[in-house]
Image (cartoon, rainbow, N blue to C red):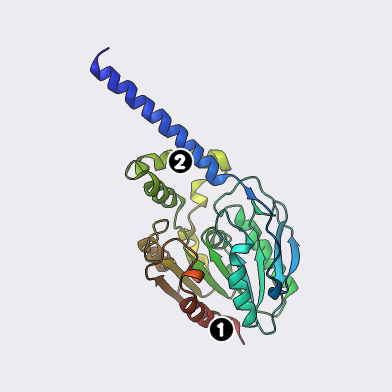
């Protein structure tokens, strides 16, 4: 066999292996992560809540606060409401009521696929409506982390919320995919990213155009605080700046020095409490 033919066969084998690997990555990233969540922190004094949505109920905890304002807490991908427990305890000590939910296909909530904010947005709308009915008269804030942030923005809440905190949100699904593949595969990850992007609509039934939170930023009618890590490779500092630039007036940006794609509350607790606490105080308290 000629040498060029052997090289061609080898190249074909590599491409097939890469395609299978990318298919596996797509399966893993979108597979539901339903699991036992456990009990809420005892000092939170939270009650269970079940909120109906167009795609099935979502589960959560609600804890009433002693003062004005309620904050909805939305966790990141492949996590659950437990990820937001520390924030809930802190906010509740400040007097806020808090609602923590498991997004669809996470924790105890129903769902067949993680859709990176598209279907999760339905749950966010339902959670906001539930809070508006159950805690009428209170101003409503939302803190969304990664997937939770994207779901909030893609829900296009308009004037139904009074303050928004977005942490480590991806701007477009194409960029999110390429960033992650580059992290794990190096430069070849950029070549394979279009293949993973191509299969998502087939797997999820969601067009890529629906997974562009940056395009929905201008629809936010409430004050917004955009947060990201300076060393985040999942959502780069440059991407976070673009998200901030796409927001309307009454906005603020905080790039956390040295932080990667991690729990920014745990990483810089004192600064987080000062900045986010001050923002919520100004927007939610009478």
The reply to whether residue 160 is visible in this rendering is no
- Residue 116, compared with residue 21, is above or below; it is below
Q: How many marks?
A: 2
Q: Name the residue under label 2.
A: 196
Q: In which quarter of the image is the N terminus?
A: top left
Seen in the picture, residue 114 relative to 7 is either above or below; the reply is below
Of residues 60 and 149, which is closer to you in this image?
A: 60
> Vertical placement of 7 versus 185: above or below?
above
Nearer the N terminus, badge 1 or badge 2? Answer: 2
Q: Which of 117 and 187 is in front in this view?
A: 187
Q: In whole angstroms, how far apart are the C-alphas of marks 1 and 2?
A: 42 Å
Q: Which residue sits furthest left?
A: 3
User: Disc 1, disc 2: CB below 8 Å?
Assistant: no
Q: In which quarter of the image is residue 153?
A: bottom right
**Residue located 54% across and 58% down the image:** 147
Q: As drawn, is 191 to the left or to the right of 121?
A: left
Residue 65 image position (x, y, % from top left): 69, 80
Image quadrant containing the C terminus: bottom right
Q: Toward the viewer: 104 or 93?
A: 93
Query: Which percent across, then down, holds residue 100?
Result: 65, 66
Q: Where is residue 16 in the image (x, y as percent from the top left)?
A: 42, 28
Query: Which residue matches tag 1?
Result: 281
Looking at the image, can residue 117 be seen? Answer: yes
């Amino acid at each position: 066999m000629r040498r060029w033919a052997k090289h061609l066969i080898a190249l074909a084998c590599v491409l097939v292996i890469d395609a299978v690997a990318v298919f596996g990555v797509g399966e893993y990233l979108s597979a539901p992560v339903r699991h036992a969540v456990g009990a809420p922190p005892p000092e939170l004094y939270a009650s269970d809540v079940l909120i109906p949505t167009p795609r099935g109920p979502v589960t959560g905890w609600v804890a009433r606060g002693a003062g004005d304002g309620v904050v909805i807490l939305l966790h990141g991908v492949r996590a659950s409401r437990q990820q937001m427990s520390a924030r809930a305890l802190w906010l509740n000590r400040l007097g806020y009521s808090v609602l923590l939910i498991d997004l669809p296909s996470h924790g105890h909530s129903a769902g067949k696929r993680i859709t990176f904010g598209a279907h999760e947005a339905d749950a966010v709308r339902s959670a906001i409506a539930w809070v508006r009915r159950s805690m009428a008269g209170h101003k409503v804030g939302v803190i969304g982390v990664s997937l939770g942030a994207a779901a909030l923005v893609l829900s296009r809440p308009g004037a139904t919320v009074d303050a928004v905190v977005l942490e480590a949100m991806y701007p477009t699904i194409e960029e999110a995919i390429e960033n992650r593949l580059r992290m794990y595969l190096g430069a070849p990850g950029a070549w394979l990213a279009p293949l993973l992007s191509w299969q998502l609509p087939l797997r999820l039934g969601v067009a890529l155009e629906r997974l562009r939170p940056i395009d929905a930023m201008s629809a936010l009618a409430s004050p917004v605080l955009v947060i990201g890590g300076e060393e985040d490779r999942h959502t780069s500092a440059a991407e976070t700046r673009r998200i901030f630039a796409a927001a309307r007036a009454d906005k603020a940006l905080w790039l956390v020095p040295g932080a990667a794609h991690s729990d920014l509350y745990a990483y810089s607790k004192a600064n987080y409490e000062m900045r986010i606490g001050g923002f919520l105080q100004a927007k939610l308290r009478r």
